[in-house]
Amino acid sequence: MYKRYAAVLITDEDENILLGMRRDSGKLANPGGKIEEGEEPYCGAIRELQEETGLDAKGIELVKVCFVKHKKLLVYLFKVKIDKDQAIDTSKDPDKEFLQLGYFNPSDVVDQLHVPLEDNVLIKYWAEN
């Protein structure tokens, strides 16, 4: 059996990616998480975005689906547009996963990623597009 994961890609005007420092590892990760049983991937992405960042999606597009075989993980990558005037608010995250969130150029933080580059669907997509 495999797990399903919704990954959320949000960029700023300079194409930096919204990443958060994880409480458990101190490393950077994108918003996202496990898609619940019976939950549509789109709904999982919206839920994770709201829980982890407090942000509302202005637009959302499925841009990639990838199976990470050795982890038995099916990743749905969504590119999300937000109103840039929204403030990030992590107070409603039940897991309290992130210590802080900010925009980073992945090239500058590749050695600080929670998910290693070889498995990181989001960073690979960003680099290719």
Image (cartoon, grey):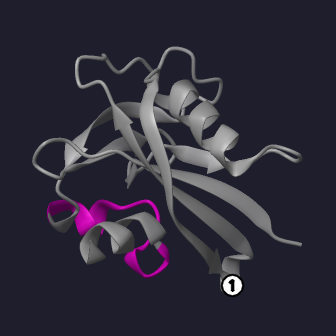
Name the residue that disc number 1 marks. 69
Does the stretch in magenta take in 111? yes
Magenta-drawn stretch, dominant element (helix, strand or loop): helix
Residue 4 quadrant: bottom right
| Residue for point 77% across, 63% down | 3
- The quadrant in which the C terminus is found is bottom left
| Circle 1 residues within 10 Å: few <14, some 14–19, many ≥20 | few
Mark 1: which amino acid?
A: Lys
Q: Secondary structure at mark 1?
A: helix
* 109 or 72, nearer to the observer: 72
* 15 or 107, nearer to the observer: 15
x and y percent of residue 86 in the render?
Answer: 30, 17
> On screen, 4 above or below 71?
above
Does the stretch in magenta take in 30? no
Span colored in magenta = 108-119
x and y percent of residue 80 in the render?
Answer: 41, 43
x and y percent of residue 39 in the render?
Answer: 81, 43
| Residue for point 45% across, 30% down | 57
Position of residue 84 in the picture relative to residue 22 (left or right)? left
x and y percent of residue 20 in the render?
Answer: 37, 41
